[in-house]
Image (cartoon, grey):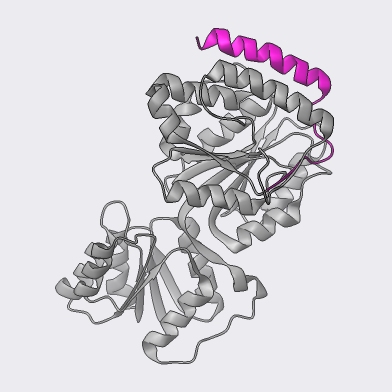
Amino acid sequence: MKILAIDDQQLILLSLEKHLTDLGYDVKYADNGKEGLELFDTFKPDVVIVDINMDGMSGLEVVKAIRLEKKSDTKILVLSGNTDEDTIIDGFGLGIDDYMKKPVSLNEVTVRISRMFGIKTIKSENKDTKDQMLQKRCVGVVIPCYNEETRLLSKEFIEFVNSNLGYHLCFVNDGSTDNTLKVLNNLSKNRETNISVYNCEKNGGKAEAVRQGVLHLAKDDQLDYIGYLDADLSTDFRDFDDLVKTIESSDFKIVSGSRMSRMGANITKESARKIISKTINLIIRTILGMPFNDTQCGAKIMDKDIAKLMFKDKFITRWIFDVEIFIRMRKYYGKKKAVSYICEQPLKRWIHADGSKLSMRDSIKIVGQLGQIAIHYR
């Protein structure tokens, strides 16, 4: 069976193509509607899988061209994150055969294809496909790394990208003096679609490492959101995915994790670190003048356009750039609008990992850096 897949997000497209090819289908793909229609004429597929929201020619325009202009009754399966009822009705009105809403599992896509033809579903021998999900949006995540050779949880990162198709992890090596770069290159080997490495030859601090990673990912047109996460995974991937779901389903421009304890949450910190953290947070809240309790949580997701705007200029501090992001939002949009654009979402799980590079001396330096921020942005 020949299948033509059309989607402008390669993270989705390549994952779908690989899965269907592994099952024995003859698959070709296009990343835009115009190219897709050209392939339709030459490839003559049995099934067309198409997304709705594409730049240029939309998915519905592709369907219209196939049904009305080409007079073809080829099976058409729409696979989209668009849940607008009118759009779905319009699709069926044009003659689509099925409509699947992202996120959706690859195995369900296979079942739907089989059902359209009344044939037995081909089961994948690859156990990894069991939980693989095509995401609603494409998300880039920056993970800054400095001398993480012994702490990097490679297995967890691999399992996450294998299960969550639509995520791209960009590891930024911040001038590490150990074998971190080698570990990262091994991690990305043969996984370049979902994992990349950005190497900074000199150590510039976490702020600049994250900034470089964000600006690098911002060049990728397929990404809808860009965020960042600490390499020690003190924030659980499940919590980070919850942040993404919140920004997808709201008008927020930034969703920031919060480690403030709440009932049912597993938030663990060292006692001394907790005292230092509370003191610093009090100073930060005073400087910000905004109702946020934990600006320093290392898990944030934001609209790509906002990310480009907030990370365009260098930060004046090496560590507490998160505070600068909040202040930049306030200065750019005004306090009231900035508050409405930022969501602080409590994490269900957060554990301070051993081997933190932030010492007591660093904590004292942070107080001084907060003073610099207050003066610089006043």
The image shows residue 265, relative to residue 344, as above or below, that is: below
Q: Residue furthest front?
A: 263
What residue is rendered at 68% in x and 49% in y?
265
Q: Position of residue 134 (x, y in %)?
A: 50, 63
Q: Position of residue 72 (x, y in %)?
A: 22, 79
Q: Position of residue 15 (x, y in %)?
A: 52, 64
| Between 224 and 19, the one nearer to me in the picture | 224
- Indicate yes or no whether the magenta region holds residue 373: yes
Q: Quadrant of the N terminus?
A: bottom left
The image shows residue 230, relative to residue 190, as above or below, that is: above
| Between 80 and 272, the one nearer to me in the picture | 272
Left or right of 300? Residue 277 is right
Q: Is residue 218 visible?
A: no
Q: Which residues are magenta?
A: 349-378
- Indicate yes or no whether the magenta region holds residue 217: no
The image shows residue 139, relative to residue 337, as above or below, that is: below
Q: Residue furthest bottom?
A: 119
